[in-house]
Image (tube, helix red, strand yellow):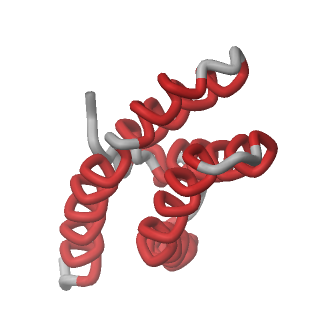
């Protein structure tokens, strides 16, 4: 499983002039990552299934769009568990998110530092 695949981001743009958009998108995702993961973990462990689904879908979509494949897959598993009301499995899967977010964050930080360097 790929932790982070920047080619997903590059598919969003048609022109080299759109590169700043891609870099801002991934930087925003990175900046909000811990907060999104915390929200999923808290919501899955809470008593509000609607909040849990909203939180996990937010993480899934943003992870998919930015190429954070491992996180997107984990969010998909949590979503499936929530849809079948398997809260123990959703909670168990949510425990894996912080480590996956750390891996994605490190990969994104590396990507951003390489992208900021002159070619």
The answer to whether any part of residue 17 appears in the image is: no
Q: Nearer the viewer, residue 72 or 96?
A: 96
Query: Left or right: 76 with respect to 6?
Result: right
Taking the spot 57% from the left edge, 61% from the top edge, the residue there is 39
Query: Left or right: 86 with respect to 49?
Result: left
Residue 18 percent location from the top left of the image: 57, 71
Taking the spot 45% from the left edge, 77% from the top edge, the residue there is 31
Name above or below for residue 118 compared with residue 88: below
Q: Quadrant of residue 17?
A: bottom right
Name above or below for residue 91 compared with residue 15: above
- Which residue is most to the right? 50
Taking the spot 45% from the left edge, 30% from the top edge, the residue there is 73
Residue 6 percent location from the top left of the image: 36, 51
Residue 43 percent location from the top left of the image: 62, 52
- Which residue is most to the front? 47
- Which quadrant of the figure contains the C terminus? bottom left
């Amino acid at each position: 499983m790929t932790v982070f695949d920047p080619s997903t981001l590059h598919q969003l743009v048609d022109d080299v002039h759109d590169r700043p958009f891609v870099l801002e998108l991934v930087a925003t995702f990175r900046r909000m990552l811990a907060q999104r993961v915390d929200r999923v973990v808290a919501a899955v462990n809470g008593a509000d299934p609607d909040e849990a689904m909203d939180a996990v879908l937010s993480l899934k979509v943003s992870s998919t769009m930015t190429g954070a494949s491992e996180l997107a897959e984990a969010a998909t598993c949590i979503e499936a568990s929530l849809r079948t009301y398997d809260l123990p499995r959703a909670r168990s899967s949510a425990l894996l998110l912080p480590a996956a977010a750390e891996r994605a964050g490190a990969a994104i930080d590396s990507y951003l530092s390489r992208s900021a360097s002159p070619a």
